[in-house]
Amino acid sequence: MKEVRVRFAPSPTGPLHIGGVRTALYNYLFAKKHGGKFLLRIEDTDQTRFVPGAEEYIIEALNWCGVSYDEGVGIGGPHAPYRQSERKDLYRKYADQLVNEGHAYYAFDTAEDLELMRERLKARGVATPQYDVFTRGEMVNSLTLSPDETAERLKSGDTYVIRILIPENEEVLVNDLIRGEVKVHSSRLDDKVLFKSDGMPTYHMANIVDDHLMEITHVIRGEEWLPSAPLHVLLYRYLGWEPPLFAHLPLLLKPDGNGKLSKRDGDRLGFPVFPLRWTDPVSGEVSSGYRESGYLPDAFVNMLALLGWNPGTEQEIFSMEELTAAFSLERVGKSGSKFDPEKAKWFNHHYLSNSNTNDVAQLLATILAGKGIKAPETLILQVSDIVKERAVLIPDLWEQSWFFFQAPEIFEEKTVQKFWKPDSPALLVKIIDLLKTIDNFSVENVDLAVKTFIHDNELGMGVVMNTLRLVLVGGSFGPGVAAIISLLGKDEAVIRIDKAIKRLSL
């Protein structure tokens, strides 16, 4: 049996959309499931759409997701180079072969010729004018010119492109591993350009040649490429090559299911559509990314894997190893999958709350360092253990814990009005005296001492605890009061209570 070889072949025309990440992920999982190879190829034949930094972004995004490739740009391999612009000398001979064997032809039409053709067809009521079996006989090409005229034009350096010669009356069959048998009549296909006038192949030509030369066995790509599949099947046949197996993945849809989730939806709908933050090199416009928004890569990948594929069980949480073992193209659906931003947050909350406390502490330490805050490692670790279950995104670690590292400067007005009473200062002075008597400042000891004080003095538990919370953190938030006092330590807790008495008594 042939070694499974798949590829992810993005164009460096901008940031990598999460739909592209999912395509890469499914290719990766399929290759690993079958002990095969996963390749990264950069398809940059259209130099007019090249965006600086896009290729680097693609590689960084895949690395962040843990979707590592076995061959490709940056690491090389037996079929290098893996950047199409560096392979352009390979393609011409195959285009010439197609022409010589009657499967392609030279087209010398100018931009004006093409525009006149479109106008003629529109006048005839053709909704989508195209260069095809019905129109090529009216155009300036080697099918309508004599061999001598064609040779003379080529010799004199006339501008031309090479187009595929689509058969006149044929059902082109595409066998798709997800969609089954797809039939398209050749009358619906146009004579696509295979080789451009600038000496570069088009996507269609380069794609087929590279997949063949790189021994790709399965082409797993987005549904948007399904209309191109019949053309690709014909090219394989005309070049005398065995085609790979095709699998066209369902679209990622907007949360309301109304249309494809596109790059232009980034931030407009209130959530990222890119794995990493992207700054447009021309406009300077910044689009948010999942990494910078505080998502863990494992959570992001787990979420993305279930958009279009299901394991056939109720299981939702998968490690990369579990995804690899469970993944199959047979369980990839045909219909589009609605993206649910709240579900994405659910995944991240699960992963964050179940992360090793040491790992969470490293995340929190990075946040603190960015704010110029120095804190003991022990405190960071203890705080992380308490707040990780309360955080949804990584920045929430700070939002849920800042008061452990900074004393409050302001106090929530609503909380003050609700819990600050005329007798609060006297009550808090007694609690300061109480805290000073505690030797072992563990959470359990602090909790017992405070609750015993409340009971012995016949006070309201809620009132005392909420008043304490107010003066310690500035509002009605945070973990248990005893935990806050214990982690702050005796000296800091007393200082905060004393300062609050003076501030709130004014």
Image (cartoon, rainbow, N blue to C red):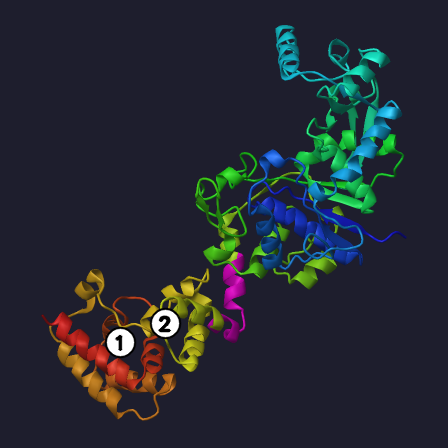
Residue 200 figure quarter: top right
Q: Residue at x 79, y 28 (%)?
A: 183
Label 1 to label 2: alpha-carbon separation: 16 Å
Relative height, residue 186 to residue 226 (above, below):
above
Instruction: State the quadrant of the C terminus.
Output: bottom left
Residue that lies at the very extreme toward the left in this rendered image: 506
Amino acid at circle 2: Pro
Query: 52 and 20: which one is in front?
Result: 52
Which residue is under mark 1? 461
325 is within the stretch colored magenta: no
Q: Magenta segment, which residues?
A: 347-361
Residue 147 coordinates in the image, percent (x, y):
85, 14
Is residue 179 visible in this depiction of the protein? no
Q: Residue at x 77, y 10 (%)?
A: 137
Residue 415 coordinates in the image, percent (x, y):
22, 64
Residue 68 coordinates in the image, percent (x, y):
68, 58
Residue 381 figure quarter: bottom left
Dot 1: element: helix
Query: 310 and 68: which one is in front?
Result: 68
| Residue 352's disc number | none
356 is within the stretch colored magenta: yes
Which residue is under mark 2? 479
Amino acid at circle 1: Met
Label 1 vs 2, first from the N-terminus: 1
Give neighbour class at mark 2: few <14, some 14-19, many 20+ (Cα, 10 Å): some
Q: Residue at x 69, y 54 (%)?
A: 311
Residue 453 figure quarter: bottom left
**Figure label count:** 2
Q: Residue at x 37, y 86 (%)?
A: 442
Residue 194 coordinates in the image, percent (x, y):
75, 29
